[in-house]
Amino acid sequence: MNLLDITLILPLAAFALVLFLSGDAAKKAAIGFALIIFLVSLGLLGPTLAAPAAMNFESNVAWIDSPAIRYHTGIDGVSIWLILLTTLLTPISMLISWNYIKERVPQFYAYLLLLEFGLIGVFMSLDLFLFYVFWEVCLVPMFLLIGIYGHDRRIYAAVKFFLYTMAGSVLMLVAIVYIYGKAGGTFDYIQILAKLHNGQLHFEPAEQMWLFLAFFIAFAIKVPLFPLHTWLPDAHVEAPTAGSVMLAALMLKMGTYGILRFCLPMFPQAAYNARIPIITLAIIGIIYGALVALVQPNMKKLVAYSSVSHLGFVVLGLFTFDQAGVDGAVYQMIAHGVSTGALFMLVGFLYERNHSLEIKDYGGVATCAPYLSTVFLITTLASVGMPLLNNFVGEFLVLQGAARVNIWWAVFAGLGVILSACYMLWLYQRAFFGPVSHEVEHHVTDLTSREWVTLIPMIALMVWMGIYTQTFLPSISASNTHMLGQVQSKEIANAR
C-alpha cells in the first residue's frame, strides 16, 4: 500500500467513524481527519513533480476476477493538482458549515468525507470500471447534501441533478462494457491505450465516434456544456454553501478531467473530427452563460452561470489540440476551482447573515463589513481574469491556443472575458456600494476568525497561481505533452 492508496482509504475510514459520532464530536473528528488527509496528500507532490509525465504511486492488483476488474491507480502532473484541490477544499467546506448545520450533523460531515473519497478515486483511477464506480460514488453524497440540507426547492434540484448525471453515466457504462469486449477482456486504461498504439485494438471511424459520444455526453453533462447545463443553476441555488463549493470547485472538473484523460487519448480521430461542433457549443456557452449571468437577480444563480461561461473556456482549450490551449484548459480547471469556490463561500457568508440571495436585498455592505468586501473584491477580480491573479493565466493560454488554430475562436471567446467583467463588477457595485440598506445595517457583520481561516488559503492561491505560474505549469505541460503525443495519431495528421 503506497501513499496514494492511504490518501484514498482515509476518507472512507473517516466516513465510517463520523457516522457513529454525534454533535460537536462528529464535527471535530471530521475536520481533524480532513486536515490529516490534506497533510498526507502533500506527500504526493514531490515524486509526482519529479516525473509528471509518468504514472506515479501506481497500484495494480486484481479486484474481481470475472469480469477482469483491477484496482489500478496512479497520478500524473494533472491529476495531482486536482487531488490536492480536493483535499484542501474538503476541510474548508467543513469549517464554513460549523455554525450553520444544525440537524443531522454527523451525516452531513460524513457525506462530505464520502464525496472526498469518490473525487480522489475519480482522479486516480486507471481502470475504466473502477473509474465508473468512483464516478457513481460521487453522485450519492452530493444528492444527499442537496436533498437533505438544501433550501426550499431542494428535492426538485437534487432529483434533477441525479437524473441528468445518471443519464450520461448509463451511456458511458455501455461504452465501457463494449470496449471491454473489444479489447480482449480488459478494463485497464493503460493496456487499452497500449493496444490502440500498437494496433492490437482498432476502432472503425463510425465505431470510434459512437464510443466517443457516449463518453463525451456523460462528461459534457457534468461540465456542464451548453445546452446540457440546465441542472446546474438549480443545484447551486438549493445546495448548502459547502455543497455549492464542492460542486463548483471539484465535481464539475470531473467532466473536463474525463474529456482530457479518456476522450482525447482513446478516441483521437473522433475527437478531432467532432472538434468544430464542440468548440461551437463551448463558445456559445461562454457567451450565453455570461449574458444570462448579467441579468440574474440572484447571487448564487449569477455565480452558477458564470461557471457555465468559464468552463466553456476549458472545453475550448481542450479541443484546440494545441499545447498552449490544453495547458490553459487544465490551469483554468484549477483556477476556477479556487476563485469560484471562494465566490460561493462569500455568497454563503452573506446569506447566513441576511438570509437572502437576492441582490436587491443588499447595498452598502462595504460600509458595514469592509474586510468581507475587500476579500469579495479580490475574488471578483480573480474571477474576471485580472492579470497577476489566477484566472488570467488559464484564459490567456486558452485564447492563445485558440488563436493559433482559428483567430475567430479567440475573438468570440474573448467576448466572454469582457462580459464576465460586466456582470461581476455590476454585482459588486449593487451589493457593496451605495446607500446602506436597513437589512444590511442590522444583519451584516464583518468576517469572523473562523471565516478568515477558510478564506486566507483561497486568497493566497489566487495570488500564487497568478504570479508563480511555474509552480504548476511545468508539470501540467509535461503531462499534456505526453497526452498530445498519443493523440497526434496518423489519422489526425492525415485529417489535417
Image (spheres, grey):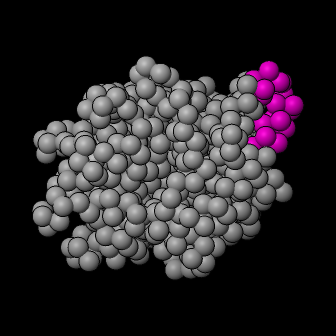
Q: In this view, does 287 lie above or below 399?
A: above
Q: Nearer the viewer, residue 493 or 24?
A: 493
Judge by depth and name the residue closer to the eye, 81 or 465: 81
Compared to residue 424, the image places residue 235 above or below, namely above
Quarter of the N terminus within the rendering: top right
Q: Is residue 191 visible?
A: yes
The reply to whether the magenta stretch includes residue 128 is no
Residue 25 falls inside the magenta stretch = yes
User: Against 141, is 377 above or below?
Assistant: below
367 and 454: which is toward the camera: 454
Q: Which residue is drawn at 58% across and 58% down?
A: 81
* Residue beneath the point at 34% across and 63% down: 484
Compare residues 225 and 305 and report the one nearer the observer. Answer: 225
Choose top left, top right, bottom left or bottom right for residue 420: bottom left
**From the viewer's perspective, is 93 left or right of 309?**
right
| Residue 355 % position (x, y) | 65, 42
Residue 55 x/y as whole percent: 52, 54
Residue drawn 56% across and 69% down?
472
Q: In this view, does 272 lie to the left or right of 330?
A: left
Expressed as whole percent of the image width and height from the top left, the position of residue 483 reads 38, 60
Say whether residue 448 is visible.
Answer: no
The magenta stretch is 17-34
Left or right: where 99 falls relative to 260: right
Residue at 61% over, 54% down: 85
Secondary structure that dominates the magenta span: helix
